[in-house]
Amino acid sequence: MIKVKLLKDNNKIKKIIIGGHALYDDFGKDIVCAAVSSTVITSINASLLIDSNSLIYDDKDGLTIVIIKNDIVTTKIIDNMISNLYELERAYPKNIQIKEENNNEINAI
């Protein structure tokens, strides 16, 4: 199962942690993993294309995204990404799970 953790500070998303595998189908044929990967990579690339200082990410062990700027464009891109991930969770509840945590202190990667 793909697990997505949304870490918020004062109800603003500050960090997103994504890990696991959907196990919907074999590696290379898994449409859920492909959809999650495509959604997330496109969102990261769009945000960084518009503002190279909007976020940072680390893909060494799963994927961790740290949102640096909470400007309107970055927020809309990230909100759209999360909306798409929630749609995937509704369609494939056995393969992707999203949890939200609201913390007052989020450590950067």
Image: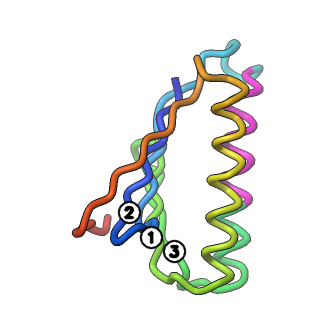
Find the magenta span and give its range.
30-42
Q: Give, as a three-letter code, the residue at label 3.
A: Leu
Earlier residue among tags 1 and 3: 1
Image-quadrant location for residue 41 = bottom right
What is the CA distance from the residue labelled 1 to the residue labelled 2?
5 Å
Which mark is in front, 2 or 3? 2
Front-lying residue, 16 or 59: 16
Compared to residue 49, the image places residue 5 above or below, namely above
What is the CA distance from the residue labelled 2 to the residue labelled 3?
15 Å
Crowding near the residue tagged with mark 3, few <14, some 14–19, many ≥20 C-alpha atoms within 10 Å: some
Residue 24: percent from the left, percent from the top? 67, 15
Residue 69: percent from the left, percent from the top? 50, 83
- Helix or strand or loop: what does disc 3 sit on? strand
Residue that numbered label 2 is attached to: 8
Q: Is residue 38 magenta?
A: yes
In the rendered structure, are the residues bearing label 1 and label 2 in contact, judged by CB atoms less than 8 Å apart? yes
Residue 81: percent from the left, percent from the top? 67, 56
Crowding near the residue tagged with mark 2, few <14, some 14–19, many ≥20 C-alpha atoms within 10 Å: some
Crowding near the residue tagged with mark 1, few <14, some 14–19, many ≥20 C-alpha atoms within 10 Å: some
Residue that numbered label 1 is attached to: 12
Residue that numbered label 3 is attached to: 55
Front-lying residue, 29 or 91: 91
